[in-house]
Image (spheres, rainbow, N blue to C red):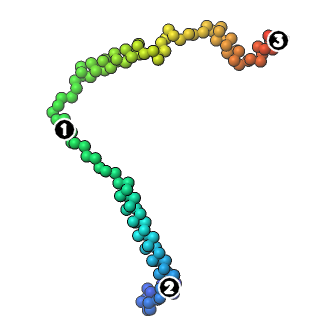
Amino acid sequence: MIRLLLRLLNIRDYEVCASCETLKKQLEFVNAEKRDLTDTLLKLVNPTIIQQPISELKSAAAPAKTFSRRRAELENFNRQRDNVIKTSPFLAKPEDIIKPTPEQAISDLEKELLPETDERINNG
């Protein structure tokens, strides 16, 4: 604190301790080393820039798609999707799904939920 006051009032230059000078030199050395390592890493990791050829821009005067063209594209897409659904062997068809009768569904649920009671009734 005294050194600070002396320094601020320009009364006397204080002496810097040797340990402070040593620490400053070590800090400078470490900072320089970190900078070198960072530069080396950036050189190693630096990606090459690939420039693609400039594609021609569409002219602003080109007309937008008309409603009839968009509708035709959507209809074509729907036809293709329906064709895939009809011909795909991996999709379940409504006629392939077997629906149990209500009595079967109830008895199956009873068997799943109460297996012990069925055994007791059959044994007892």
Residue 43 lies left or right of residue 22; in this view the side is: left
- Residue at 18 percent across and 29 percent down: it is 63
N-terminal label among 1 and 2: 2
Can residue 6 be seen by looking at this rendering? Answer: no
How crowded is the residue under tag 1: few (<14 C-alpha within 10 Å), some, or many (20+)?
A: few
- Residue at 37 percent across and 18 percent down: it is 81
Q: What secondary structure is found at the residue carrying circle 2?
A: loop
Measured as percent of width and height from the top left, residue 6 is found at 46, 88
Tag 1 near tag 2, CB within 8 Å: no
Q: Amino acid type of disc 1?
A: Glu
Q: Amino acid type of disc 2?
A: Cys
Residue 124 lies left or right of residue 74; in this view the side is: right
How crowded is the residue under tag 2: few (<14 C-alpha within 10 Å), some, or many (20+)?
A: few
Measured as percent of width and height from the top left, residue 17 is found at 50, 85
Can residue 48 be seen by looking at this rendering? Answer: yes
Q: Amino acid type of disc 3?
A: Asn
Determine which residue is flagged by label 1: 56
Measured as percent of width and height from the top left, residue 18 is found at 50, 84
- Residue at 68 percent across and 11 percent down: it is 107
Residue positioned most to the bottom: 11
Determine which residue is flagged by label 3: 123
N-terminal label among 2 and 3: 2
Measured as percent of width and height from the top left, residue 25 is found at 45, 77
How crowded is the residue under tag 3: few (<14 C-alpha within 10 Å), some, or many (20+)?
A: few
Determine which residue is flagged by label 2: 17
| C-alpha separation, residue under disc 1 versus residue under disc 2 | 69 Å
Tag 2 near tag 3, CB within 8 Å: no
- Residue at 43 percent across and 85 percent down: it is 8
**Front residue of this view, candidates 38 and 84:** 38
Q: What secondary structure is found at the residue carrying circle 3?
A: helix
| C-alpha separation, residue under disc 2 versus residue under disc 3 | 98 Å
N-terminal label among 3 and 1: 1
